[in-house]
Image (cartoon, coloured by chain):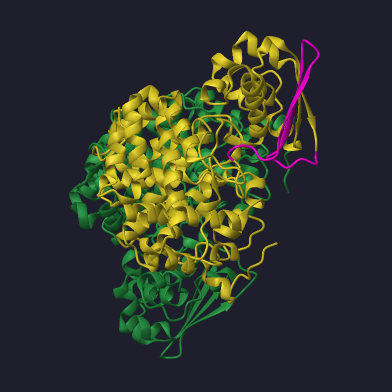
Chain colours: A green, B yellow
Amino acid sequence: MQSDAAGGSPLDSVTEAIATYVAEAAPEALPEPVRKQAARTFLNWVGCAVGGARHETVNIALAALAPFSGPAQASVLGRGERLDALLAALINGISSHVFDFDDTHLRTVIHPAGPVASALLAFAEYSSVRGPEFVNALVLGVEVECRIGKAVFPAHYDIGWHITGTTGVFGAAAAIGKLLNLDAERMAWAFGLAASQPVGLREMFGSMTKSFHPGRAAQNGMTASLLAARGYTSSTRALEAKRGWLNVLSAHHDSAEITEALGARYEILANSYKPFACGIVIHPAIDACVQLRNRDGIEAASIRSVVLRVHPLVLELTGKTEPRTGLEGKFSVFHAASVALIEGDGGERQFSDRAVRDPAVIDLRRRVRAIIDPALTPDAATVTLTLADGRVVEKRIEHAIGSLARPMTDADLETKFAGLAEASLGAAGTRRLLDLCWGVGSLDDVAAVAEAART
Amino acid sequence: MQSDAAGGSPLDSVTEAIATYVAEAAPEALPEPVRKQAARTFLNWVGCAVGGARHETVNIALAALAPFSGPAQASVLGRGERLDALLAALINGISSHVFDFDDTHLRTVIHPAGPVASALLAFAEYSSVRGPEFVNALVLGVEVECRIGKAVFPAHYDIGWHITGTTGVFGAAAAIGKLLNLDAERMAWAFGLAASQPVGLREMFGSMTKSFHPGRAAQNGMTASLLAARGYTSSTRALEAKRGWLNVLSAHHDSAEITEALGARYEILANSYKPFACGIVIHPAIDACVQLRNRDGIEAASIRSVVLRVHPLVLELTGKTEPRTGLEGKFSVFHAASVALIEGDGGERQFSDRAVRDPAVIDLRRRVRAIIDPALTPDAATVTLTLADGRVVEKRIEHAIGSLARPMTDADLETKFAGLAEASLGAAGTRRLLDLCWGVGSLDDVAAVAEAART
């Protein structure tokens, strides 16, 4: 329900409270686990951006917009171009989301790094930024977008907003505003300018416009803070006002999610990373198939049938039985299970047109059945194989790899990163970039990361 | 009520219908009165942009964003800078709205020219455009934004969206898409990209962010069409889909307003122009005061009291009794009446800090009373003066100057334009720019207008 009165209550100061928090939060205040998680979030984002940079979506965006670019201030990760910082933020935001392989704040389904890190790294190249300040700004940006997301989830998402783009503008504004040393009033103005520029409708899912959303959110948030820094005024009640963002963009909200325990808990600790390049609901099934293949050395030819026992959302979201393209493959748990049993992974290569059209994958896919089990949690699944010789083997996953209960290890993240980056940066370049990402918090100039991510 | 079914009805094709119309509409199809009105709309917009260009809001936006500008492709009207076309569209959109003096589509309270003309003229400088194509694109842009506005007004505006910014993105996308010769499918993609980038909450009214809205809408719409032209895909059902723009951004809508009688009627014919630099509700009172002063030669010192009989909205929107700044003066019918009686106008100069703080204006303002009369139409008012010698004089306005029933004449528009432009362009430069605006439809290259509007 709409829990805030329109005026006069103590909750009137939501925008000022979060603006003041961001303006005052110092790098030294970050607990060590938060710094560590920030490095993981950043590393995962860099890998996704480098890996996605050669996608057709990125090629088109560059062809359309590079003629309007300003000075060469910032890099397109995974490529050679340099653009003005605002445009680089847009393009890197697109790259980092185009494989649907980026991070997920599970409670809100926000992909936090896209809007925030895309703005931050581009800005860091434009205006020299040290590691501690960069990490602090990243943590604060994620904090702001995820808290605002929690205040409106699920009503805001259910009606049709792509929550990564709508809240991401605030995240990017917070992060860049922090680097610009905005005081609380100007930070509030930046949030006002951000509130007036939400990005993203879910109707665009399945088209290139989906990955436009985090990129544009990065660009809009940076624009908001650049303007506010010069004194461009806005409302200081952008979130909670009667005609402010919370009321206009969500039928229900709880603004306490934005203001409670600021500085005492960190949303980035609830961030998660995808081991597989597809919607998170089919990760448990993929995880089971990969483990069955590796544990039992099962070959596709020896499998008579596959039965998946899955959460109801799996068939609602990924029930496509005959995918024809890589993109459609991401919405087919049947394809995902088949290709995981054959190739032992669920990376971007397993969701390519090549993989979806592979006769062996298609043949096995048609022997995959799915059974809904409402008793399962979303991160659980059971896969049962009946082999040609009559044997039955089974794998039950309680918590899929990548879930909060079973997070990807640092080594897992490195393997994922290498799979995304090595084709364009080579093994040595990838290693060097990994090391820079792990050490981001102690760099003298974070621009070094962007330079190492160029081809 | 929400009149469209989520799927399967004939109305499913709203986006495709409007996209097809824009893609196919030829300059030759425009009736002469439409071309004439387009020239009036364009001229009024150029005057507002030139006049607003030295406002502090524009100075700040330029200081913040010029460092990121691309090549010098387009002019900032009323100034000397040249910027990339996307940024020029933003800045000119801000300038043209900063005085609240631009055009109004009364049915929807959209200010149609800001988003559309700001995008168009900047793009015309970047890519040579002839007059007939320019005017056609302007008419189509206004058509698209006002029809979408009619489909969601008043619910969309009431909840808190600044409808000029939210629908303006579509208008700018239509106009630029037309100049780019997008086919119907790519025009629909442009509308998809536009739908994902709405701009503007009403909460920002009273701050610089209000004039950011039409500018950003221009920039977003141009971006949408530039991307779509290169093949950046989006939904082709952006308006009518279950999670499309109409459902997500408005509790109630009637999409028939978007598709009915396309090409048979033109919304630009319902556009109006402000004679006074403030909200339209106080125009009848100002009109009456100016006429009383000029007709009867009344001096402020001779006025004992002023009684305004006005529509209820006047006190709801402009009931401020003690304004302290020029901007606040725009929200005070008491100031507006006082200064109109003293200075005989309601232009930007009458809503300056100087005017609001003028002791004579303050003295008379405190003798102005307002009486609500629900029987009045919004464009009517009666002003009654009691003079020091006991005489009572009265003026009743049935339809204020600038209303659809009593539109500003071409000569009125020229006088308004000169008041805005002469300070920066001089009399001869203003005359030359006026002539170019009147003749926009037959120019070989519309860039000539922008060149003549530079200082």
| Residue at image coords 34%, 64% | A348
Position in image of residue A291 (x %, y %): 41, 69
Asked if B363 appears above or below A399 in the picture, the reply is above
Q: How many marks?
A: 0
Q: Position of residue A4 (x, y in %)?
A: 72, 39
Q: Nearer the viewer, residue B255 or A307?
A: B255
Which one is nearer the viewer's eye here, B348 or B316? B348
B385 magenta-colored: yes
Q: Is residue A151 magenta?
A: no
Q: Is residue A22 visible?
A: no
Q: Where is residue B312, by image quadrant?
A: top right
Residue positioned 42% across, 34% down in the render = B47
* Residue depicted at 47% across the width and 69% down the height: B16
Q: Tell me if residue A355 comes above or below residue A74 in the rendering.
A: below
- Tell me where the magenta segment starts and ends, as one range: B374-402
Residue A215 locus on image (x, y percent): 39, 48
Would residue A26 appear left or right of A70 to someone viewing this image?
Answer: right
Q: Position of residue B404 (x, y in %)?
A: 60, 46
User: Can the viewer see residue A283 in this picture?
Assistant: yes
Closer-to-camera residue (A354/A441): A354
Q: Is residue A173 left or right of residue B83?
A: right
